[in-house]
Amino acid sequence: MKGEKVKAQEKAKQKDETQIAELVGDLQRTRADFENFRKQVDLQKENEKKAAKLATVYKLLPLLDDIDRAIASYDELKPLEKSLDKTLKDLELVKIVSDEGIEFNPDLHDAVMVEGDGEKEVVAETLRSGYVYGGEILRPAMVKVKKF
C-alpha cells in the first residue's frame, strides 16, 4: 500500500512538473509575442512619424522655390540664403548642388533642356533647385544642360 501511495505521489509530481513546464513555455511564448508586438508598434510609430515629416517637407518645396527666386531677384535678400541653408540642414533637407559648370549627374539632376553636341555634359543653368532629405533624393534639380 505504501508503495502504491509513493507511486501515485510520484505520478502526481511528474504531472505537476509537466504542467509547470507547459505553463512556463506558454508564459515565455506570450512574453516573446508581446515583445515582438511592442517592437512592431514602435516601428510603425517611427514610420508614421517619418511619413508625416516627409509630407510636411514636400509641402515646403514650393515655398522654398519662391524664396530661391526672390533671393535671385533681389540682392538685398542674399544674406538670407546662408540662414536658410543652415535651417534646411538642421531639418536634414539639403539643396542639391547644381551650379553652372558642374558635371551633369542624372541621379541628382533632371535635364529639361540640352544645348550643343558633344560628349561632355555640364549644367548650364538651374531652373529649379533639387533637394535631398535624410540622405535620399527628394526631388532632383531641374537643369539646362550644355554639351561640348
Image (tube, rainbow, N blue to C red):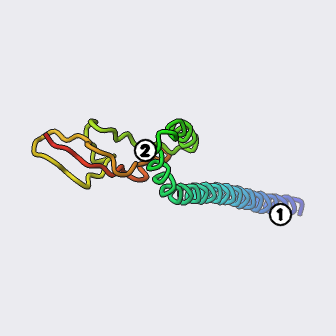
Is label 2 or label 1 in front? 2
Q: Is residue 141 above or below residue 58?
A: above
Where is the C terminus found, in terms of image quarters? top left
Crowding at mark 1 (Cα within 10 Å: few <14, some 14-19, many 20+): few
Which label was assigned to residue 143?
A: none
Q: Mark 1: which amino acid?
A: Ala
Residue at mark 2: 72
Q: Quadrant of residue 29?
A: bottom right
Residue at image coords 34%, 41% = 98
Q: Which residue is mark 1?
A: 8
Q: Position of residue 85 (x, y in %)?
A: 52, 39
Label 1: which secondary element: helix
Say which residue appears at 81% left-offset and 58% top-offset.
Answer: 13
In the displayed structure, 58 sits above or below 143; it is below
Whole-percent x, y for residue 38 in the image: 67, 57
Q: CA distance from mark 2 to mark 1?
A: 94 Å
Decide: is 29 above or below 80. below
Nearer to me, 29 or 12: 29
